[in-house]
Image (spheres, rainbow, N blue to C red):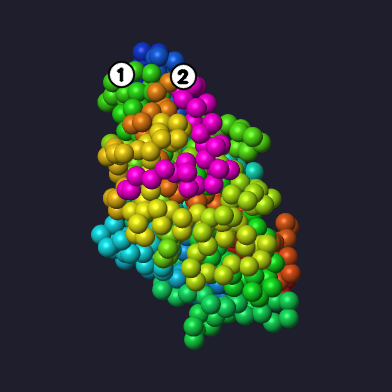
Amino acid sequence: MIEEYQIRVLPEVAANEKGIRTFLREEKGLSDAEVAAVRVLKRSIDARQRTIYVNLKVRVYVNELPQDEEFVRTEYPNVEGRPQAVVVGAGPGGLFAALRLIELGVRPVVVERGKSVHERRKDIAQISRSQVVDPESNYSFGEGGAGAFSDGKLYTRSKKRGNVEKILNVFCQHGASTNILADAHPHLGTDKLPGIIEAMRETIIRQGGEVHFETKMDGILVEGDRVEGIRCGEQVFRGPVILATGHSARDVYRYLYAQGIEIEAKDLAVGVRLEHPSQMIDQIQYHRREGRGEYLPAAEYSFVTQVDKRGVYSFCMCPGGTVVPAASGANQVVVNGMSNSQRNSPWSNSGMVVELHVDDLNDRSIMELPPVPGIDTKGRALAMMEFQERLEYAAFLQGGRRQTAPAQRMAHFVNKKMSYDLPQSSYTPGLVSTPIHFWMPDFVTVRLQLAFKNFGKSCHGFLTNEALMIGVETRTSAPVRILRDRETLQHVRLQGLFPCGEGAGYAGGIVSAGVDGERCAEMLAEYLKGR
């Protein structure tokens, strides 16, 4: 017999199966002899009151053992000799598109400009050591995409777009902990993701697909109104194309614009990465001096407010995490956050960003930022990208033309004061104290200052000089949307071109990019049937 219960228990009870069994024995009258196995189906923490509880949905196997795996396994057929499609980019959008193509009997050829996830680690480590960014292998480019070394959070609100549970199950099939199926805010961790990504690649190759690294697309093959493949130097790969290049492939946006392939500027959010001591966030969020204690995870937070008709909010919160250099080329300083599966760093961070609409670019203070040398960005469709580039270049200049990042204490920023010293930080390339409130556009800084005051009132202790602002956070999403038909997901004018994922402007994060990748694969398979 199988029973399911919704239970509300203390953290020490929820910490392991023994505690849950004891609760079931005492509250439900089930003896240890009767209970053959217990599975946690859903898990969330309620820290709204002084006494913290964990809400669990559990499945109890009474006098019988489970007959199935904890996740739903997907069967992948061999697709050697089957119709071929090209997938540009091996981030979550591209990888899930390739796997779904295999399910549907289409042979994927994945083309990735960067290196394998294993080789990519070495280039990322060099950013802190040498202060030099490899433009083809960094936190944005390479196998796994921007998410591979940026925390691995799997929380999404895009459930209407597709099967989120399918994405999580595929991760489990390739080595992820089944905890992600239960947790309210599932998280893989930067230490676990590379192995999972490698396993996904191995499935693609084993079932007859191809994966090419250090192979950069420099042209799309168009015949009439139909895309027939791509060009990578002297190599040509033929087939309909899923374009999943990620939110930092600015050369791709420039190429599309120059070729007259319809794109448009997209709203964005920019700001800083805010870092607190993790113990402080634990104490604030759990309402107790000891913080998380032995049985609770590093605490999360989520803030959102409106300031002068624009949203200001926390983004990509990394409890027990680190701030990382996320530039993808020269003359840039960009920061992001990540955390390992244990989330045991002494710091916690999140992006703190201000919503920026395309029409806001008319604000004079925004475009007074210095232009980037050697880059001539023209056209309304690329205007938001130009702003991104200018803001990252301004941060580069403030940081001393290295990957050293500009920083300021939080309360000093709010009160427009210089920080003459800085607290310790997880950001390994180094920090330079600068008056962020002075050189960043007023459109952003004034809203951040007012929002921080609001957050400090609602969350006592949050607004403090022990917190550090590190600039700049600009890669919250793509600055461009590649226009596609709502029904077929093909480009509005070119048949056989499927703009996909975060880089195309249709996703925001690992899971939603994976969902969009699957949807594009399904539409591509339908397209092949009709040819």
Measuring 47% from the left and 41% from the top, which residue is drawn there? 437
At label 2, the amino acid type is Arg
Residue 386 shows up from this direction: yes
Which secondary structure lies at badge 1?
loop
Judged by depth in the image, the label closer to the viewer, 1 or 2, is 1
| CA–CA distance in space, label 1 to label 2 | 15 Å
Residue 469 % position (x, y): 40, 40
**188 and 5: which is toward the camera:** 188
At label 1, the amino acid type is Arg
Which secondary structure lies at badge 2?
loop
Identify the disc placed on residue 48.
Answer: 2
The answer to if 454 sits in the magenta stretch is yes
- Quarter of the image holding residue 382? bottom right
Magenta stretch, residue numbers:
431-459
**Quadrant where the C terminus is found in the figure:** bottom right
The answer to if 261 sits in the magenta stretch is no
Horizontal side of 223 relative to 109 (left or right) equals right
Horizontal side of 225 relative to 276 (left or right) equals right
The correct choice, above or below, for 218 with respect to 281 in the image is below
Identify the disc placed on residue 289.
Answer: 1
Residue 314 % position (x, y): 50, 37
Residue 21 % position (x, y): 34, 22
Rate crowding at label 2 as few (under 14), some (14 to 19) or many (20 or more) other CA atoms within 10 Å: few
Residue 74 % position (x, y): 49, 54
